Image (cartoon, rainbow, N blue to C red):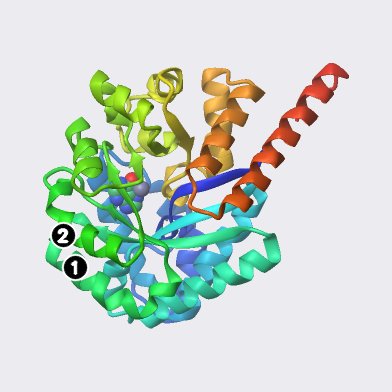
Amino acid sequence: MLPVAELHIHIEGTLEPELLVKLAARNGTWMPVLDVEELRAQYTFDSLQSFLDLHYGNLRVLKIEQDFYDLASTYMTRAAAAGVRRAEIFFDPQTHLANGVPLEEVFGGLTAALTEGAKEHGISADLILCFLRDLGPEAADAVLRASLPFRDSFIGVGLDSTELGHPPALFAGVYQMAAAEGLRLVAHAGEEGGPDYVRGALDQLHVERVDHGVRSMEDPELVARLRDEQVALTVCPLSNVALRVVPALSEHMLPGMLDAGLLATVNSDDPAYFGGYVDDNMAAVQREFGFGDEQLARLARNSFDACFAPEADKQRWQAEVDSWLAARAARAAAGIQAS
Ligand code: HPA
Ligand code: ZN
């Protein structure tokens, strides 16, 4: 299995229908649909907003620390099977606060599962607190302040939810506060928003990494800058198909991004909704674009380059990618079918 870092994964987006049904029963939460197949059948979307509406509704089943533990612990087990060595995991505290869940329950459950997963699966994992951009900058400021008592439990901040109409510049102040706290900075930009959103994230928020960023490809000057500065982009191919950012995987920008010399990585976004985890995304682009081992290894190396783990860990994982590639080459030379 190719070792990778997963840098764009919303823990709430790993809520599979099976766990949703279990948590609703455990907590006595009324939900309009509580059948696994029926839930899955609803998961077709025509835009980011159509997904978010359904997704936020489902999150009402998350009530207590144990629920957040179960959610993240299930993800860690699945991530281990996907070859994940490092996970930088988004979470949306504002959603849970709005559902009446105190931050203690959210942080308690998530951090316990990450600590446990590190021991059990050898995965290094950290949390990135995301602001819901459609709730505006004052709400973002408030949730960051409310989360500072848990400062040791997260490594960075991000920006997600409805992109159009909520440009990065609005959040310059709260990102400045996050930077002063020593937090790492990322933001969703260039998913539904155009190249201007990516520029805004770089220039106004000073992000170190751009989540999605695929619409940067519409602007050659921006592409040149992303290449020259080697800004990491956390691309989510199956998500982009599911939310109609691209009409089909065959038309995805990923090959063009790699050809342009960008530091693109492959990630799953919300795997319970978009057709798979990071390994599924890797397999999909491998199949669609005929990527060989060298290209898969490049994507894995990019993911470790782009991650916020200590340098020694990054080098160890990069060496694992080298070993994976060497083993694949040896097998090919021996005429053994790749697996
Ligand atoms: N974009 C914006 N907000 C989100 C996403 C996304 O892809 N996934 C979960 N929240
Ligand atoms: Zn996302």
Q: Quadrant of residue 132?
A: bottom left
Q: x, y (%) of residue 169?
A: 14, 48
Q: Indicate the position of residue 269 as horizontal and vertical percent values.
A: 42, 47
On residue 173, which mark appears? 2
- Residue at position x 26%, y 60% in the image: 131
Q: Label 2 near label 1: C-beta < 8 Å?
A: yes
Residue found 58% across the figure and 21% down from its top: 291
Q: Is residue 333 visible?
A: yes
Residue 44 versus residue 132 in the image, above or below:
above
**The N terminus - image quarter:** top right
Q: Quarter of the image holding residue 158? A: bottom left
Secondary element under disc 1, as helix, strand or loop, is helix
Identified at 62% across, 65% down, the residue is: 117
Disc 2 element: helix
Q: Which residue is mark 1?
A: 141
Give amino acid for label 2: Gly
* Few, some or many residues within 10 Å of mark 2 (<14, 14–19, 20+): some
Q: Position of residue 250 (x, y in %)?
A: 43, 20
- Give residue 317's position: percent from left, percent from top: 65, 45
Amino acid type at circle 1 is: Asp
